[in-house]
Every structure is written in structure tokens, then in C-alpha cells.
Image: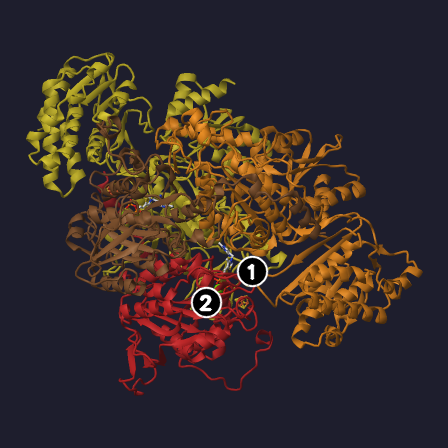
Chain colours: A yellow, B orange, C brown, D red
Amino acid sequence: MATTVDLGVQDKAARTPQPGRKINDFSIQVATVNGSGSQSANSVLLRSIFQMGVPVSGKNLFPSNIAGLPTWYTIRASKQGYIARKKEIDFLVAMNAETAKEDVMSLAPGSACVYDEPLQLSGLRTDITFYPVPFDKLVAPVCPEAKLRRLVKNMLYVGVVDALLGIELVESEKALVKQFGKKKKAAELNAAAVRAGYDYALATFTKQDPFWVERMNETQGKIIVDGNSAAALGCMFAGVTVVTWYPITPSSSLVETLIDYLKEYRIGPDGKATFAVVQAEDELAAAGMVLGAGWAGARSMTSTSGPGISLMAEFIGLGYYTELPGVFFDIQRVGPSTGLPTRTMQGDVLSCAFLSHGDTKHILLFPASVEECFSMAVEAFDLAEQFQTPVFVLSDLDLGMNNWMAHPFQYPEKPIARGKVLDEEDLKRLGGFARYKDVDGDGIPYRTLPGTNHPAAAYFTRGSGHNEKAQYSERPDDYVNNMDRLARKFDTARKFVPVPVKEVSGTSRTGIIAYGTTHWALTEACDQLSKEHNLAIDYLRVRAYPFNQDVHEFIKNHDRVYVVEQNRDAQMFQLLKLDIAADQVVKLRSVLHYNGLPIDARSVSDAIVSQEAR
Amino acid sequence: MATTVDLGVQDKAARTPQPGRKINDFSIQVATVNGSGSQSANSVLLRSIFQMGVPVSGKNLFPSNIAGLPTWYTIRASKQGYIARKKEIDFLVAMNAETAKEDVMSLAPGSACVYDEPLQLSGLRTDITFYPVPFDKLVAPVCPEAKLRRLVKNMLYVGVVDALLGIELVESEKALVKQFGKKKKAAELNAAAVRAGYDYALATFTKQDPFWVERMNETQGKIIVDGNSAAALGCMFAGVTVVTWYPITPSSSLVETLIDYLKEYRIGPDGKATFAVVQAEDELAAAGMVLGAGWAGARSMTSTSGPGISLMAEFIGLGYYTELPGVFFDIQRVGPSTGLPTRTMQGDVLSCAFLSHGDTKHILLFPASVEECFSMAVEAFDLAEQFQTPVFVLSDLDLGMNNWMAHPFQYPEKPIARGKVLDEEDLKRLGGFARYKDVDGDGIPYRTLPGTNHPAAAYFTRGSGHNEKAQYSERPDDYVNNMDRLARKFDTARKFVPVPVKEVSGTSRTGIIAYGTTHWALTEACDQLSKEHNLAIDYLRVRAYPFNQDVHEFIKNHDRVYVVEQNRDAQMFQLLKLDIAADQVVKLRSVLHYNGLPIDARSVSDAIVSQEAR
Amino acid sequence: MSATSTPTPAPAPKTNHIGLTVLDYRGGKTTLCAGCGHNAITERLIDAMYEMGVQPENIAKLSGIGCSSKTPAYFVNRAHGFNSVHGRMPSVATGVALANQKLMLIGVSGDGDTASIGIGQFIHLMRRNLPIIYIIEDNGVYGLTKGQFSATADLGSKLKTGVINDLPPIDTCALAIQLGATFVARSFSGDKKQLLNLLKAAIAHRGTVMIDVISPCVTFNDHEGSTKSYKYSKDHDEPVQEIGFVPSFESIDVDYDPGTTAAVRMHDGSQLRLRKLDRDYDATNKVGALTLLAEAHEKGEMLTGVFYVNATAPSFVEQLNLTEQSLARMTEAQVRPSRQVLDGIMEELR
Amino acid sequence: MSATSTPTPAPAPKTNHIGLTVLDYRGGKTTLCAGCGHNAITERLIDAMYEMGVQPENIAKLSGIGCSSKTPAYFVNRAHGFNSVHGRMPSVATGVALANQKLMLIGVSGDGDTASIGIGQFIHLMRRNLPIIYIIEDNGVYGLTKGQFSATADLGSKLKTGVINDLPPIDTCALAIQLGATFVARSFSGDKKQLLNLLKAAIAHRGTVMIDVISPCVTFNDHEGSTKSYKYSKDHDEPVQEIGFVPSFESIDVDYDPGTTAAVRMHDGSQLRLRKLDRDYDATNKVGALTLLAEAHEKGEMLTGVFYVNATAPSFVEQLNLTEQSLARMTEAQVRPSRQVLDGIMEELR
Ligand SMILES: Cc1ncc(C[n+]2csc(CCOP(=O)(O)OP(=O)(O)O)c2C)c(N)n1
Ligand SMILES: Cc1ncc(C[n+]2csc(CCOP(=O)(O)OP(=O)(O)O)c2C)c(N)n1
Ligand code: SF4
Ligand code: SF4
Ligand SMILES: [Mg+2]
Ligand SMILES: [Mg+2]
């Protein structure tokens, strides 16, 4: 079958090398409706390019309903390895009548468009290449079963795109096998469809557009996975034992994937589970269960999104003040309120940092990659138990639900850290303990677990005032001592949370700070700035709150520092402003992106160039 | 009866004027147990001094249970009119065996102590004056009914203190009548007790201590009331129509008093209520009811404290994003979590300012006095409807539950402002409207109320993304436009919220910023600083968030600005740091007090003196 | 799509007794899955409002979050609607009812929105007998989050993924009756006639109407092994009576046989007629209703019909002794006491 | 006070079958009002734990917020305690039960903590049949916030201030049974014998035990006109049966008359003996139980006793198929899969 590759379009192209060729550097957008099964077709397309060794990324833009509304899937191929969103669409596959016109009109001149023939789009513009495909006619012969055609139809465009872009058919066939796994029949049916589309395109079209996929060797040994699955794996390898959740987009898939993994890899030799998962009645309950389990000694977690975070506010304050471990994933979506549940944003930074009434501060981790979704999940459990406090992992919809190219995950080298827990033996040795005493001067007290078989093990946990011995107290001095110790504990965390990642030339006076998924637009933007404007800018990626000393150093060592993030209120900018020395504040500048689409490099570089001009 | 005043202790005193006399400038502390009925005795004592024309304040330090635990009531008489808490106790009334020793030991040399004879405290120290009183012996004859004695006993110390300090008995008798109102028998019984204590003291003691109450004319026409009652009155005169609540200390009394007032003054001519009050099942429900009522056109409110605020987080985000009016009182107590429910703090400033996930900001008002509890309650309803958003009134336990001397409240001069509401007529004229359109450029859109009888009146309210016409939208541009308008609206609020109060010499380079109840320690501290250290310091009292231009000006016009507040994390300091120009941040310094006791002047002046030294 | 783009113009449209056509009760285009039970319920609501001649502007539509909770956007565009937050519609509705007692409240919720996150507010709304038509569009799953079990899923019911539900279902009807709701029924989105008559009677009721409508989720819970699928529901739907309704504005002397049919006079004078089927059931007996449902629960029966009705009990709003005019419409003179009142109070505080 | 300051030393203290004295089950000094019903319940809990010989260290005490919720600090100091947040103890308890299935959970709540703010979590805990002894110390008011009505206050009950309750009470027992709790009873803090035997049987049960204990608030709800006062409760307390209990470690062949007494074999082998009084009541019949309570509700009767018991139903923890050892005690080897596992998964993702 591989032979086919030597024929047709690509072959012609190969023979007549065109100067204006755009190779491995463009983006494809498939416009369709959700629930139409296009998802698997898009994944196959993504994988095919990936298997061609070309760095690729895919972003799914879907509506907040179940079926029938416009959906766009964007695949970016980038020989430079840029995987951030790219604003411009070069190659459109228009399958959705509702949006087809607008989709075509928004294309840049010189781009190409494959479309469902009946839509008759060719007349719309003269400056782009159109490839009309009679999908319904083509699907009938390959898919006898009428009611399956709606789905299979999608695979046809995979074939068409393969042919037009020079993606080797065999790669799509491999991808199909991966996609459908055991479902042999489905795989074959879809393979036939891909092939039909491929053959049709070869037979029908003469390549007009400049876009080509050519084999590279940049994805060797890499994996493709979404952030939520990566985080789920992290939780499993962190040794999570109690998982509670309440479904919410874009968080649900984290726990649903985790459940699958746990069922497969965490059933003991006795055939019994070494974990418990509860679908709670709501997020308040989910949070309460996490804290109860943490109190009793489990490694517990939940995952939610903005609305759930708000509902957990009271419980998080309890966790902070009674000092209970627990890991809270917030897969951020666009707020406020219900907002745009299927769009991405970094909008819960401030609310998580200070969640709950009274004086509270919380540890936050900011994964930027699927690798970090895995590694930070592991770290989060250690931090939660070492610091006996709720720890938040702030991912987002873009990271959590989209597929990302990544290096295989590193097996955790550090043993599990359970923190300062006293057992029977310790108590025999010590004779007793004071739950809230700062024995080691780091603000972190010692605890015992319920069921510890020693008469001095028990203590009383309460959200009301307490002294070092955990006895009820309304004494002003007890209160102040305890609150000061909590502040000290938080300060200690600065040294233990993940350190920032720096790219520092040492010469540049300008710096950029970003975090989470904003990172990917940033690396690309930095290249644009140096290439196009020869602005060499240093870059620091914050990975946790409270801020590590390096963050303060970085700002000290630069004249101007741009904080780039995806929300309206410059939330990280504000956290930094609060944390850094007063005389450093003047250095901070803010670059914001908050329309719900993943941030792109051009928006960043443009914003910085214009601000630099000032 | 007034004749008695010319006899005994006071008389002697009068005849032999002592140089070291401390007149109208000391504090009395009554140490007892809660549930023992000492509350009314303490109020009578407070009122008696008040009626002597002497500026006075009372602070109740009570435990978080119902009966049997230590309680301290402190009354401060101050000819200078200082009504903040004073750290030092000059005159102790020790009635509680459990704390008597510690109470006595913590007295300053030269102070005095009346105590229940069986406690035998006289031996404890030689540097203070003791007045042992056999309360049980004395109470029997005046109170035949044995089971009432526990209560009546308290009135005895009122009489004793009257005699020793020279408080005219007749004033206590007047106060009693006010206290017991219609309950004639109770009033008489208690009067007899006061009298018995008075006579016993006159007959038994020779005045040793220097403390005296002498008539002044500083309370003429003033009233005594607690902040929660004042706020309740404000709500009634604001025309509140829907009140929802869930009991919580120290907020409950606000709504409970409001209910009483409404029942008395808001029953229409038809004998029917012009208000609805619902005791909700919890704070989430209370918040939802407020927003639902506000949406439908009522002036709605609820009152709660920290834990309730946390539970309302999700709903407040909905209110912000769907733009619904509602007034939320937060009578702050000590957090985090349950914390110290019967102690005071300004600890919810940050959580209220940014309550809920996503990009949200809220209008906050900070009453410092009972007068402002009244006036700001009125303003809050106007602001909520004018800006179509939740408005928070941040009072605290000290202000809300303690009795304060005040000027009679001013009847609201401004008519009720219902904001931009379109009715049938308007719609006929306009033909229609767009719910979220910024017609006037101030960011504030127009709304209609359900039930408005016009085919174009209806619109759909949702916490999810929407365009100007309130239609569901996931479009990036719609989202950004709407969020930018909301930010604009919030900015508009700066010009409409209560302006700060300034005391500016024009010459001083140093400034102080405070808010809420911290004010009272501040005014006294400023005097201490100028008198004792001749530091003339300007003072600005913030009364609302977002900050008015004057706040920025004030900071601009000074070299150093101390932000004084009652919480651990310098929450107002942080809000200011975020709001002011970057080059101004260096000027801010923080003074904190957070042990749960109302802040006192000395702590402030000491802190500032030591920081000024640097 | 055509629904919005090209409304088919009818020659001389039929009108109801307030002179409106059925189009006046239309809403926006549904974005739910084709075949979703919720769409059928939306249709019945439109019919019921139209046939009862409810003034659209007097309706307030409320909901929580979920596919079901989206539906208020799909009927009666001429009424204000409020799609609030997940599980908390009851409190929002309570506020609306207090602010404007003249409004007719229609609350639409889902089984997740009501029985999981919202059960607390649900219970307290029922307990208050708040005047509202509270509809649960019950499919046993969380549709909008892609098919997890809700708390009304039956024991042993199976998900597409094969997962079996091992927790007992919450019977929202039994709860509603026990807690104080005064019109409690269950129906099936597939039973047009029963649901329509129920909704018309609901409109005629004053107090809490709670209708749990089994409403299959074609995408996530309509398969073999589901107990909330169309097939299962059709096969197991067992009406406890046949429901007839005669609105107040029609002559109610269309006679019926008292031997076989019980007639309930509704708040607005309409008549709800319950014709006996196999069993002799008295829908006005609370204890009987609870026993019936408890037994059905044990046997795993799916009963539909009116389980309990009390057409005379006072609603929450009545208990508050509110003035005639709605609170939202009060004038300053009515709600701000006079200067004298304030002076008087100040005097007392001297 | 003497309780803590000077514990009266007994010569040779009596011990239970694990060799502990009643002092080993003591807690801190109560800070509740003298005469508060809650204190009596605390005493019964201490007695029950002592007499059943429960290892103090194996107990976990949980509560929400309220006077009642303070009581876990007043018994069994040798057990870990957790006074959480208002109305949310059930979720905390669920987490604890999952983390360590070996613990015996005692949850203490109030009527406000459970029936108002906490009703949602209460319902879902009952539905899960979580292994816990859930006690509602029910006084019909919010004690700690000074006496407002709670959702269990009876219709027409009067506050000291004269305010009358006009909302129907929530019957937590009926709810618990309906939702899936497997041991449901009501008692009165004044009835030492009944409460003690109930608690002992509760300790012998596996699954959710829900006991609603009428517990008068002497400060805010013990007056004339209150239906939760000592007097009213004494006068109206109507036991549905006489409760006897024979623990597993005593010989259970102390015989009884099967004609008059029903014996239920509890999970741990103990025997709960229910002797008929006026009525012939079968506490193992769920429908019967619900009907009984519905009727009592209508008549305004205050029934006490065991309403429903199912000693064999699987508890939530059993349904989760958890490994023997408690999750809290798992070693790294047990919870962190091997390097090979990760490599395998990575391979699949290539
Ligand atoms: C606080 C909060 N948690 C979770 C969600 C996510 N969510 C949206 S709809 C839904 C469940 C809807 O189920 P149901 O009420 O049965 O409605 P259906 O879609 O089945 O009609 C959930 C969990 C949310 N919107 N808000
Ligand atoms: C979130 C929250 N809201 C309100 C309160 C105030 N509060 C403390 S106890 C209580 C009610 C207690 O009533 P109940 O559970 O019946 O206990 P009781 O005091 O009567 O024993 C309330 C409302 C709180 N602590 N937390
Ligand atoms: S997912 Fe289910 S409930 Fe939601 S719209 Fe589709 S069919 Fe209806
Ligand atoms: S207030 Fe009532 S419930 Fe609380 S301790 Fe006192 S008597 Fe008990
Ligand atoms: Mg559902
Ligand atoms: Mg109570």
C-alpha cells in the first residue's frame, strides 16, 4: 500500500519543485458540528502528521452543549516545534453549513479550503484555493450502513487532506488502528473511508496551494496525551488513595481517566482496590470528603473547575486553619459564574490564592505542560502532606482537554513524603505531643492519625480557636501565636515548591514572566521578538505560589518585566505586586489575553513591541 | 432621693479635694460569667455614666457559648471623648471565681477592685485598692425570690460602683427604667438592688482610689445604640422589601432587630406587610433569594459573617456577571474558618473584594460608626440598584454588637434611587432594549423587571456567556466586550461610592489610612502622637472600595502612609497596593492588630513611633 | 434551524381565550440533541401555556444548570428567564416569588440539578409550599457533563460504559409529598396527553407543584440496561389514574361518573378529573400517597399520575401576609417611613 | 468543674470486658448549659462505649457546628475528634470512613446542623448507608445562635418571643429510612434506658445508624408552648416497642418470648430485642415504617423506638470492594505502581 505514496499529487509536486512551498509550517482547521464524530477523524489527522515526525498540536474549540453546534478543530504543524495556537488558518476543511461562509471569509489570501460540495463555497473568494468534495456521494459505497454514514463521512476528509498535503496514507492507517484499538471492524470501515477520500483527491485535484507535510524526525519517542490524563497518571503514581469528585467541564475527564487507570493498575493481589472513588453530591461534599480522608491519613484529592472552587471556599478555610492535607485540581475555564465552560482561561489564580474568609493563603502549582501535569500531581500530594494544607494545581481547559506532544513521563524518583506524622512508636518515645506546636521552627507542626493505638495519640481538630495542644481557646495570645505560625509555615513553603524555570541571557534588561499554558505562546513570541525586532528578552516561568526567591531575583535583575497571562484582571501580576519589594513594583507591566481562545504568540509579541515603544 | 448624692463617700471626697484625682478618664471592667444576667447591669452602668454627660463606651468580651464561661465587660469614661478600647483596666469588678486571680494580677498598680467577698482577693496585691462586697448576703433581703437572686445580684455592683465613683444614683434609676421599659416589677426589684449596693458601699468603704465620675455636658442629645440596630434602621429607611438570612454571630441581631422594626413600622394601612423576611436554610440559599428578589425588582438584602461569605462565593459571581442588585452585610468576626466567633476583626476585606472564581470585583462599604451603619445601609441599596451588582457592607463584631454613643441619625435626604430600569412606557417609547448594552458610556446597562407588560420587555438572564442582547454567546468578541464593560462599570463606581474622610494639616509629610472601627483608636492615637511625640500626622479614612480619587491623591501628597487595620495579612494595605500607581507603593507601611480584641490607640501610636524611628 | 430563519406563516392563526396564538408562546431554537426527552416537555409546556391562556409577560422562567435547565430559553420568549447556577434555582425562585407574587413561576430542573447538588434547596422549597411549577426533567444521568449517574438512577441501571449503579434512587415525589408540596405527580415525556393535562392542572394550582417527568437522554441513557430509556419507560409506565382537566373558563358541567372519577376543584376554579384505572387510588390522602410510593419503590414499579393534591393549603407567600401590590412595585412613600418615625426612634435611644 | 479539677478516685474501679474503666471514656468538661439535653446524651454515649467495651483509640468523633456539635469534646478524650463546619459533617465523615474503614465513626449533629443547612449532605450520607452512628441532638431550635426555629420545629410550636412556627417539621427518621439508612430510631434524652440500649445496638450495627434524639434546650426551647420541652416530651413520648439488647460477648440464650418479642441479630452477633407494647410493630418492614411515621406525622404523635433495622444490607465501604488494610495505612509499594507500569503506559501513548 505504501506504494501509493509515490503516485499522484505528491508525485507531481515532487517532480515540479515550487519555490513558494510552505512545508511543515501551517495550520489546518476542520469546521464541523459537535456530536458528529469528527473528533476521531481529527485525532487521526493529528496522529498522522505526528507520525510523519512533524511537531504538531491540536486544539478543539467546542460549544457548551452535546450535539449539533459549531465546532472547530485546529491542527498546527510546525517544523520549529511551536505548539501554541496560531491565529491564522492556512488550510480549512469546511463541513458545517452554519459557519462555512464566515469561516471562508476569515481566511487569509493564499490559503486553501476543502469543503462539502453542496455548500458551494468556491464562488465566495478568488484569492484562495477551493477543493469541493461530494462527501455524501463518496461515503455511500464505502459505508453500506446508512446510519453510520454521518460518522464515517468525517474519515473521508482525512483521506482528502492526506492526499493534498502529502501525508502518507499508511500513517493515517496506523493512526486509525491506534484510535480504534480492539474495534477491528470500525477500524477497517474507517480505513476504507480514508482511502476513498484519498483516492478521490488524487484523481480529482491538482494541487494549487503551497502547503505540504514532509517527513522529519522531530517526534521520535514522543507521546501524545491530554493534560487531564497526564494529571490522572500523576495522581496514580503519587499513590492517591481517596478520590472524590463532582462532574464539571473541563475537569471531569481527569477523574474519569484516573478511575480507568486505578481499576487497571491499583487492584491489589487480593483482587481488592487500594483506592476509593466517590462521586459526591456536589463540590462542597467533595471537598469535605477530601479533608476528612486527609485527616484520617489518606492521600486524597478532588478535581473541579471555577464554580466548584467557589463552592469549596468554606471548607478550604477549614483545611487551612485545621491544617489538613488535600490536593485540589482546578482545571480552569472561562468565568465569572458559568461563563464559557468550554473555553480556556487562567482566571482562578487570585481566588485560589486567598480562597475563604479571614486571613488565608494557599499553595498553588501551575503546570504548563502535560509532563508537568504528571510531575506536579506527584509533587502536590507530597506538599499537601508535608505542609498539612490544601494544595491547588491550576491547570486549564487548553492543557487539560487538548492533545499535546510530549516526552514520556519520568518515573518519580523521590519516595512518597508523608510529612510529620507520629505513630505509636514515636509516641511511646515522646510520651505525647502538641498538635500545633512549632517544634522545628519551620511552622509545620506534627500530627497523629485517628486509630493510632496510643492513649496520647488523640487530639481534637476544630475550625475554632485553639492553642498548641489543640485545646479550645479564645485567648488573644493563643490566636496570634497560631496565626503567626501559619504565616511562618507558608513562608517555609517558598523554599519547597517547584522553582521557576528561567531562560536568562544575562545581558537583557527586559524580562517576561508567564505561567501555565501561556508558556507555549511565550517561547514562540520570544523568538519573534528577537528575530523580527531583535529584542533579546529574558524569560521566567513561575511554577508555584508562594513565590520562590528566584522570582524576586529575576525582577530585581531587570528594568522592565512583562507579566503575560490569560485573564482580564492581571491576576498573577497582582499576586507578584503584592509579594515583591515595594521598590520593584514599578518594573511590572501586564500583557493580557482573555477571549477564551488559547493565547497565541503574535498577540504577545505585538503587545510587547508596542509597550516597548513607549 | 437626689439628696443622697450629697452624702457619704462623694461628699467626703468633695470636701477633701485630692490632687491625684482621675476624673472622667478611666476604664471599668466587670468580670463575670455569661448567662448570669450581668448584661443588663452593665448597660445600666454604661447609661448612668452617659447620663452624667460623660463620654463613654462599652465593650463586651464574651465567649462562644451560651452560659457559664468567663465574660468581661469594659466601660471606658473619657472626658476627651475617646471611645476606642483602652488596654489598661483601672477599676475592676471581679465576680467570676474562675478568672478573678488572673484579672487582679493583670491590673496596673494604683487601680481598684470591687469583688465578691468569698473570693478573698485582698491578699493578692498591696498596690491596689480592694473593696470586698458580700453580694450573697446583700441580695437575700432585697430579693425574696431565691431563683432570681443570681440575676439581681449583678445590680448590686452597679450600686457599689455608683457610690465609689460618684455616679448619681438617680441616673442609674433612670437607666433602669429605660432598660426594663414596661417591666415595672423587674425595674423596681433591680432598683432596690442598686440602692442596697449603693448604701452598703457608702456605709462601709472609705474611698481610696483616685477614680471619679463628675458631671459634664458632653452627651447632650446623643443616643446609645449598637451598630447592628443602626444598620437595621438604615435598611428599613432604605426601603428594603425582601430580607433573607441565616443566623450567625455576630450578624443575627441585625436581622432580628430589623424584623422588629419592620413589624412595627412597615405594616401598610391594609394591615399587611410591605416586606418579606425569610429565614433561609443556609447562606447559599439566602444569597440566591437576595439575587432572585433583586432580579424581580425588590430591594433585597441579607446579613452574615465570614463563613456565610465563603458559602455565597458562587452566587456572588453570578450576581456580578448577570448584574443583579443585592446588599450583603458582613459583620466580620475572627477567621479563618469558625475562628473566634465572638471576637472582632477586619478579616474579610480581600475575600469580599474578589469573591468568586474568575475575574470579579465588588463594591465594598466600610462603616466606622453607628451613624454610618445607618447611612451606609441606605447608600448600599442605592448603589446596588444603580450599579446592578452585589454590594457589601463590611461592619464588624465590635461595631455591630457593642453599644456606641452617637449623634441621632439624619433622615435620608436623597430620594430612593432605583437605577436604570425601563418600564412599559419607556419600552413603548424605545420599542425595545438591549440588556447589556453600554448606552451611556458608564458601563451600566438598562434592565427591565419580570412582569413588565410589554412584548419587548423580556430578556434572558444567564451566568453563561452572553452578548449585548442577553443572547447566549460563546463568541470571543462578545465575551471581551462584556467583560470590558463590567470593568468600566466598576471604574465608574469610584466616583459614586462614599468619599473618604480626611483630616489634613497640609503640612505633614506623614499620613495614616484606616477604615471601619479602627478609626476610633486612630483619632486617639493621632492625639497621642502629636501630644507625646509632636508628630503631626494627616489622616484619611477609607469608606469604600473601589477607591475614590481622593485616596490616590492623599497617598501622592505624603512621603509615608501608614495603613492601620485589624487583620494579619494587611488586607486593605494589599488592596491599596494593587490600586495605586506603581511609583506610590513604596510609601505604604502597615500597622496590624489581630488578636480579636478591638484595637486600642496605644498599640497604634507605639507601632508608628517605632516605625518612624527607622 | 428553519424554525428561526423562516417561521411558516399560518393563514388565520388559531388564538386562545386571551387572543394569542401558539407562536406567542414559542421560545428560541433548541440546542439539545434531536430526540431528547426535554424537547418534548418544552413542547407540552408551550401547549399548556397556550391552551390555558396564560399572559406570557406574567411568567417567570427559572432553572439551574444542565441540558434540562437550558430549556427555559426554548419556550415563551416573551417571559423573563433566569438560568441561574447548578442546583440553586429554588432559592432564586423563592426570591422572585417574594418580590413579585403576581408572577407565575415555572422552574425547570434536572435530576442532577435537583437530586444531587440541589436536594437541600429542593427540600426547603417543598417545605415552604412556594407557589411554583417545579419540573424535574429526569433522565437518571448528568446529560450536559456526558452521562454520569445522577441520584435518581435506579439500582442496577447500567451506563453505556457498563458501569452499574449500586446506590438506591431518590424518589423526588415521595420527598416532595413528605415535605409539604401540595401537587405532586410523575409523568413521562413520551405521554403527551397525560403530561399536557398535568401541566394545565399545575397552572391552575396555587402552591408548590412538583412534577417529576421521566425524560430519556438519547445520547447517554437510552440504551439496553438503562431504566430511563424510551423503551424501558414505555414498557413500565403504569399510570395510577387517567387524568382529565376542565379549565375554569370552559363549562365544567361536562359531566362525569363520580363512581369511577374523582374531581378536584383547583384554586382557580378549574377541575382536575382523576379516573380510576386498575387501582382505587385517592390522591388527596397523604399517608396513602407515601405508602403507595414506598411500595412501588420496593417493587421497582414506575408509577405515573397525580400522587397527591391539596388544592386548599396556603402557600408560602400567603403565610407571609404580604400586601396586595407586589413588593417590587412599592413606591418610596410605601417603603420609607416618615421623618417622624425616625425622630421617634431616636428619642427612644436617647 | 470538679469533674476536671478533682476526679474522685475510686478504690478498685469497675472495668469493662477490655479492661478499661468508665473514666477511660470520659471527655473534657462540658461548656453547655446546666440541664441541656445534650449533656444527657453525652453521658449515655460514654456509658454505651464503656459497656460495649469499644477501644477508645478506634473511635473517630465527628460533628458540625452547634451546641450539640460541641459535645464530641466532652466524651472519649482518647479518641480523635473533628468539629468541622456547619452542616457538612457527613462529607467529612465519608472521607474518614474511606480512609480508615477500621474506625468506628460517631457523628453528632443538631437539628439545625442536619435539617437546615446540612439536609443535602445528610440525605446523601443516608443514601450511601455509610458506616456511622449519626446522632441528631434535636431541640427544634438553633441553640448556639440563641434560639431561632430549626427545620424540625413542629407546626404551631412557640418561641419564648411568642413567634409561632408555621412550616411543617422535617422528619429526619422518615427521610433516613426512605433514603437507605439501615438502623433508624428516635429517642428522648430523658429516657436513659431506651437511649442506652439503642446506642449499644447502634455500636453493634454495620451501616448507617441514624438516631434522632429529642434533646430539650433549657435556655431557648423548654417553655410552655414548645413541643420540644422536657415536659412536652415526657408527656408525649410514645415508645413503639420496649428495647432490650444482649451484646455478643454475653450469653444471648437469656431467653425471651418470641410471641411478644422480636429479636434481631446484629452484625457483630449481638441481639436487639424489641418487645411489643400496645401496637404490633415490625421494625424490619420498610414500607410499614414509612407508613407508621407518616401517620404519626399527621396525628402529631411523638413516637420513639427503633423504626427500621436491616442488619444485613451492605454498607458503602463494603460496596467499594476495598482491600482489608485501611487506605490510610498503605505503603508506597502498595500504592505506587512500578516503573514498568509507567513505561507500558508511555508505550501506548506513543
Ligand atoms: C457548581 C457546578 N458544578 C458542576 C457543574 C457541571 N454541571 C453542569 S450540568 C451538570 C449536571 C446536569 O445534570 P442534570 O441536572 O440531570 O441535567 P441534564 O443535563 O441531565 O438534563 C453538571 C454537574 C456546574 N455547572 N456547576
Ligand atoms: C456557615 C455557618 N452559618 C451559620 C453559623 C452559625 N451557627 C452556629 S451553630 C448554628 C445552629 C446550631 O443549631 P443546631 O444544629 O440545632 O445545634 P444546637 O445549638 O441547637 O445544639 C448556626 C446557625 C455557622 N457556624 N456557620
Ligand atoms: S445529552 Fe441527553 S439530556 Fe442532554 S440534550 Fe442530549 S439527549 Fe438531552
Ligand atoms: S443553649 Fe440550649 S442547646 Fe445550647 S447548651 Fe444551652 S441548653 Fe443546650
Ligand atoms: Mg439529568
Ligand atoms: Mg438545635
- Image vertical order of residue A41 relative to residue B142, above or below: above
SS label for mark 2:
strand
Mark yes or no: residue A155 visible: yes
Quadrant where the N terminus of chain A lies?
top left
* Percent coordinates x, y for residue C251 in the rendering: 26, 47
Query: Which mark is drawn over residue A468?
Result: 1
Cβ of mark 1 under 8 A from ligand 2: no
Q: Tags 2 and 1 in contact by the CB under 8 Å rule?
A: no
- Image vertical order of residue B476 relative to residue A371, above or below: above
Drawn side of residue C4 relative to residue B84, left or right: left
Q: Chain of mark 2?
A: D
Q: Are marks 2 and 1 on the same chain?
A: no
In the foreground, A437 or B134: B134
In the foreground, D68 or D237: D237
Rendering quarter of residue B538: top right
Q: For the residue carrying disc 2, how many other residues have a C-alpha within 10 Å: few (<14), some (14-19), or many (20+)?
A: many
Q: Chain of mark 1?
A: A
Residue that appears at 54% across and 28% down: A587
Drawn side of residue C304 relative to residue D182, left or right: left
SS label for mark 1:
loop
Rendering quarter of residue D247: bottom left
Residue under label 2, please give it: D138
Mark yes or no: residue A402 visible: no
In the foreground, B263 or B6: B263
- Image vertical order of residue A565 relative to residue D213, above or below: above
* Percent coordinates x, y for residue D23 in the rendering: 50, 77
Q: For the residue carrying disc 1, how many other residues have a C-alpha within 10 Å: few (<14), some (14-19), or many (20+)?
A: some
- Image vertical order of residue B36 relative to residue B435, above or below: below
Nearer the observer: mark 2 or 1; the answer is: 2
Rendering quarter of residue C66: top left
Query: Which mark is drawn over residue A245?
Result: none
In the foreground, A182 or D157: D157
